[in-house]
Image: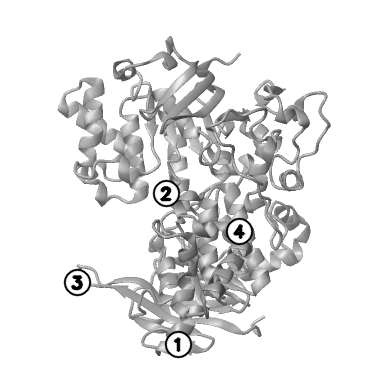
């Protein structure tokens, strides 16, 4: 599976912010992951975990303090040429969380959607530009005549479609979607998720999907990284992570997802994550946390002792799966069957 | 027979907006039973907040209860006109917790003062006594070191802790009914789980009856004993939580459940509800959900369905339950969900 081409490579990324206190605030520390072409990669964490900062650093809104972001093998963090900057702007686009706040209230849809074209100069004349606007509006399921209207005339779901159209018009390869459906109603969420999936198939897009809602992440992503306090604590293929979480923080997050099943909800025990269980006191290398591959493609953060423990748990679970397939099938049944 | 603590009958609420009249609640009825948690679930604009705000006289100034009654004890709350009428009910009998704890708290006063002033008002107690009670409530809602935290300002607390303080203020008057309007929507899932647990705990400790407003069906499954599903200003289905999740009857309830990503299959489209909610400025003929309902019958476009009884505690407003209607299976996503529950670790 690692033979797929790597589209984005985030390498030991660290992002600090200067605050009034003497010590800078470290929002992202030592984060590394790769996104393969055509996949949907999820970044999950709670507020303040640094997930949005990572997205914004990739798209060059924030500066990387150290580490690198590479796109198709080319460094795009730090100082880059004008030419490359323009290429990045065209190739990587972002969809924002709040469709009420992210559209310019005073501009018509025509201008809002065209802005990317103006920035990248991807049109020869007015005719071509307006043809592109018409085409992209239709692609996201809006009527071409909406171009002459203002954002306030649209519902939340329609506004988010406008946000998608604006990202799509420059024909990007890679889209960072930062909580694109959190502000929407249940039925509208389904529409926007379907739209994102359809566009991915149609245009071969790659997504970085940033979210806190794990049920949505499970549905839409291929692989997930769980992030806590600026660090990736676990990274795996989505079903593997949901079936076999290893890090206690992941377990606590998964246990907190509300399920639409009263019996299970009323019996469930939410696991509380206590960060003080980790002994990461600096100095000793064996106590320093690192991301280790426990089973193929499944990475967990820990020090030497913890990693040994995760290996044991994974081995026990693998043994259980082999011997007790019958007893396990009952447990598997209550999860939606993933497509093989 | 169970006695409702609060009983709303055929409530119609209207708003005047720029010279036009909007009917936000179209004849909704609801019984709230002592000691239980009722979840009201619906999408934005369905009227769930407006409906419950009418129970404490907090409708916006351009809105009014046009007809119907809200029985609470010996009162008909729908007849209340002045702020004076409401003084004995609001806070004392029925209290409300709002969505955003940041705007519900005064940033310039310590949280201790904000709770204590409610206690002093309510109990006409002296300062020392009120302070002791305030600290006790802070402990009850899970604030660690309440003595120390008493003197701190809202900005010194996290979002989850602030929501606990808002709940503490609501509890300060010993209300009988607590209305929680999306209290966890702004919070992280792990914090949300803690607040849900807290609400269950204070409900038990303070012997409360709770109305919980949410759009999240997972949260409903967690907190609710009873569920009311709202659509376009009306309660379209009402029943025990298990009846609603394991035996839903209204096509809108089916649609809501079907569009959950939890029930989706990877790589396949999620179910979506076609069209958009009706315009509440115009009178609605027949069943408000009919234009979006793939199972709509001809009569749905003409006559509004009455409530059909599914069980003594379960009602749904859909013609599909009429004996003359064709027998329908719930949609595939719902059948799949029910099959999973049956095969899973439940029971």
Badge 1 marks a residue whose secondary structure is: helix
Residue labelled with disc 2: B186
Above or below, B72 relative to B288? above
Q: Residues within 10 Å of mark 1 (few under 14, many from 20)?
A: few
Within 10 Å of disc 4 (Cα), the crowding (few <14, some 14-19, many 20+) is: some
Q: Earlier in the sequence, mark 4 or mark 3?
A: 3
Image disc number at residue A152: none
Residue beneath disc 1: A84
Residue A239: in sight, yes or no? no
Badge 2 and badge 4 both on one subunit: no
Judged by depth in the image, the label closer to the viewer, 4 or 3, is 4
Badge 4 is on which residue? A193
The percent position of residue B338, horizontal first and vertical second, equals 73, 43
Tags 2 and 4 in contact by the CB under 8 Å rule? no
Q: Give the vertical position of B28 relative to A99 (above or below).
A: above
Spatial separation of the CA atoms under disc 2 and disc 4: 21 Å
The earlier-in-sequence mark between 1 and 3 is: 3
Q: Residue at x 73, y 48 (%)?
A: B333
Compare residues B59 and B127 and report the one nearer the observer.
Answer: B59
Q: Provide the residue designation for mark 3.
A: A22
């Amino acid at each position: 599976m690692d033979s797929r081409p790597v589209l984005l490579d985030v390498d030991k990324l660290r992002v600090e912010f200067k605050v009034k206190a003497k010590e800078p605030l470290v929002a992202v520390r030592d984060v590394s992951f790769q996104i393969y072409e055509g996949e949907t990669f999820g970044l999950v964490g709670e507020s303040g975990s640094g997930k949005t900062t990572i997205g914004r650093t990739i798209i060059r809104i924030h500066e990387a303090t150290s580490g690198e972001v590479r796109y198709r093998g080319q460094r795009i963090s730090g100082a880059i040429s004008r030419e490359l900057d323009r290429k990045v702007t065209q190739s990587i686009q972002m969809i924002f969380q709040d469709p009420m706040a992210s559209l310019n209230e005073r501009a018509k849809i025509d201008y809002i959607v065209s802005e990317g074209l103006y920035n990248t100069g991807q049109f020869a004349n007015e005719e071509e530009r307006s043809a592109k606007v018409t085409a992209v509006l239709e692609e996201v399921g809006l009527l071409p005549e909406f171009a002459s209207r203002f954002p306030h005339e649209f519902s939340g779901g329609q506004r988010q479609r406008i946000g998608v159209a604006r990202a799509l018009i420059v024909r990007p390869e890679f889209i960072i979607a930062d909580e694109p459906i959190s502000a929407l109603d249940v039925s509208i969420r389904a529409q926007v998720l379907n739209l994102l999936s359809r566009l991915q198939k149609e245009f071969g897009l790659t997504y970085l999907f940033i979210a806190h809602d794990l049920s949505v992440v499970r549905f839409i992503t291929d692989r997930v990284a769980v992030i806590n306090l600026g660090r990736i604590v676990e990274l795996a293929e989505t079903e593997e992570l949901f079936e076999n979480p290893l890090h206690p923080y992941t377990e606590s997050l998964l246990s907190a997802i509300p399920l639409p099943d009263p019996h299970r909800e009323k019996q469930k025990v939410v696991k509380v994550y206590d960060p003080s269980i980790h002994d990461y006191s600096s100095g000793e290398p064996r106590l320093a946390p690192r991301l280790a591959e426990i089973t193929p493609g499944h990475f967990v953060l820990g020090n030497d002792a913890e990693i040994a423990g995760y290996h044991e748990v994974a081995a026990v679970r693998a043994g259980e799966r082999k011997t007790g397939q019958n007893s396990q099938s009952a447990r598997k049944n209550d999860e939606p069957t993933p497509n093989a | 027979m169970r006695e409702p603590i609060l009983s709303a009958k055929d409530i119609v609420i209207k708003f005047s907006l720029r010279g036009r009249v909007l009917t936000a609640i179209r004849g909704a009825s609801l019984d709230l039973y002592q000691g239980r948690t009722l979840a009201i679930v619906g999408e934005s604009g369905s009227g769930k907040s407006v409906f419950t705000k009418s129970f404490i006289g907090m409708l916006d100034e351009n809105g009014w209860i046009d007809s119907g009654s809200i029985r609470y004890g010996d009162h008909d709350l729908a007849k209340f006109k002045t702020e004076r009428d409401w003084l004995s009910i609001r806070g004392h009998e029925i209290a409300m917790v709002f969505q955003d704890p940041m705007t519900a708290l005064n940033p310039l006063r310590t949280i201790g003062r904000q709770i204590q002033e409610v206690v002093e008002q309510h109990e006409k107690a002296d300062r020392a006594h009120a302070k002791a009670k305030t600290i006790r409530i802070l402990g009850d809602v899970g604030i660690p070191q309440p003595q120390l935290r008493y003197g701190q300002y809202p900005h010194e607390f996290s979002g989850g802790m602030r929501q606990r303080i808002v709940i503490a203020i609501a509890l300060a008057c010993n209300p009988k009914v607590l209305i929680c309007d999306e209290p966890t929507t702004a919070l992280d899932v792990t914090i949300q789980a803690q607040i849900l647990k807290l609400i269950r705990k204070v409900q038990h400790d303070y012997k409360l009856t709770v109305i919980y407003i949410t759009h999240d069906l997972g949260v409903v499954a967690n907190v609710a004993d009873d569920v009311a599903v709202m659509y376009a200003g009306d309660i379209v289905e009402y029943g025990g939580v298990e009846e609603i999740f394991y035996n839903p009857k209204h096509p809108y309830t089916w649609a809501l459940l079907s569009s959950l990503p939890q029930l989706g299959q990877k790589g396949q489209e999620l179910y979506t509800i076609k069209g958009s909610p009706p315009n509440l400025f115009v009178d609605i003929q027949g069943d408000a959900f009919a234009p979006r309902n793939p199972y709509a019958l001809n009569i749905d476009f003409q006559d509004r369905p009455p409530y059909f009884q599914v069980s003594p505690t379960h009602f749904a407003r859909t013609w599909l339950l009429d004996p003359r209607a064709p027998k329908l299976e719930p949609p595939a996503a719902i059948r799949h969900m029910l099959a999973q529950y049956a095969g899973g670790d439940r029971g």
